Amino acid sequence: MEVIRYHESWRASWDSFIMKSKNGMFQFLRSFLDYHGNKFSDHSLIFMEEDRVVACLAGHQVEDCYHSHKGLSYGGLVTNIENISQLQQLIGAMEGYLTAQGFKNYNLRVLPGFMHPINESLHYLLLENGAAMTNYRLTMLVNLHEEINYSSTINRKIKKYANSHSTVGLTKDLAAFYQQLADGLNNKYQVSPLHTLEELQLLQNLFPDHLECWEVIINGEFAAGCILFMDRNWVKLQYLFSAESNASTLLLHQLYSIKGRFQYFDLGSSNSLDQHKLNVGNHQFKHFVGGRPKLLYNLTKDL
């Protein structure tokens, strides 16, 4: 198996493979990776077998460590291979290339198992090959194909808002929406959004089918909003904020129904930015609105 460092001349082949792969997602497309500009030193890899692409790995270099792309929610090997022996060869080719290039270790923010069974096989084989779990964090996942069990308190809040003059819908005014987002995050957590307005506008233009902004209007006033990333069988809650107390519960309740064609609704991690401390209150809220815990982690190894 041959490993090639990505070059711009491979853009069409890369994107074509990502779209056809079994465990890829739109965030691995080159236009999504490129919106980060020069924040990362790209060192993405293409794996070839008999002149055809069999896997891709979006990554970059930090001194002598190889990272799956740190600007993405998820990372890891994207492939169509499901045979265990061939997956072992894929991992061996990756590690052989990284060693030959002088990397001392790697750090992969692996794709969750719920996205595709291939990911679970890759996780196991990487662990069997000496990788270790690091940067573990707890996300909350809603299975939209099963009955969603809310807490009694959440049920009361949903009924309260269902009887009010409220509407839930998409918004195209991203600038006004972003100002509400920035104010909400600053007031509640004293932090700014991870994305700038210009970045979100670019992503919305590039991926209109994968990024949406939703809001709740109650009595003519903005009450809550969120940004969603969507692909294949999952929806990822990127931001959730509210100006009206508890209006976010109504928003999520409506979105579960609206997005029922997807299977999984990822409410996101409740860990602090350094990933080592769980925000218990935030985690409990996600549990009350139907989320169930799913462990996520990075896989690292010294070469």
Image: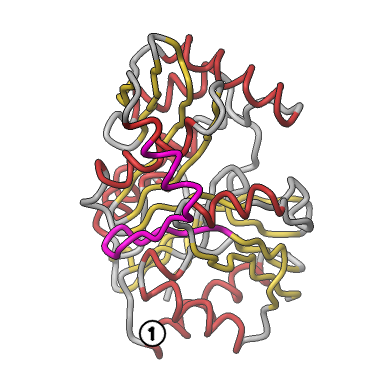
What residue is shown at x 63% (from left), y 66% (from top)?
297
Q: Which residues are magenta?
A: 139-159
**Which quadrant holds residue 97?**
bottom right
Residue 88 lies left or right of residue 191; in this view the side is left
Q: Quadrant of the N terminus?
A: bottom left
Coloration of the structure image: secondary structure
Instruction: Identify the amino acid type marked 1.
Output: Gln
What residue does disc 1 label? 86
What residue is shown at x 47% (from left), y 30% (from top)?
247
> Would you say residue 140 sits in the magenta stretch?
yes
Residue 246 lies left or right of residue 182; in this view the side is left
Towards the viewer: 175 or 30:
175
Residue 118 place in picture, x, y as percent: 38, 75
Residue 5 lies left or right of residue 189; in this view the side is left
Q: Quadrant of the C terminus?
A: bottom right
Residue 55 place in picture, x, y as percent: 39, 65
> Looking at the picture, does residue 261 appear above or below residue 110?
above
> For the residue labelled by badge 1, is the local secondary structure a helix, a strand or a loop?
helix
Residue 270 place in picture, x, y as percent: 64, 51
> Would you say residue 151 sits in the magenta stretch?
yes
**Which quadrant holds residue 87?**
bottom left
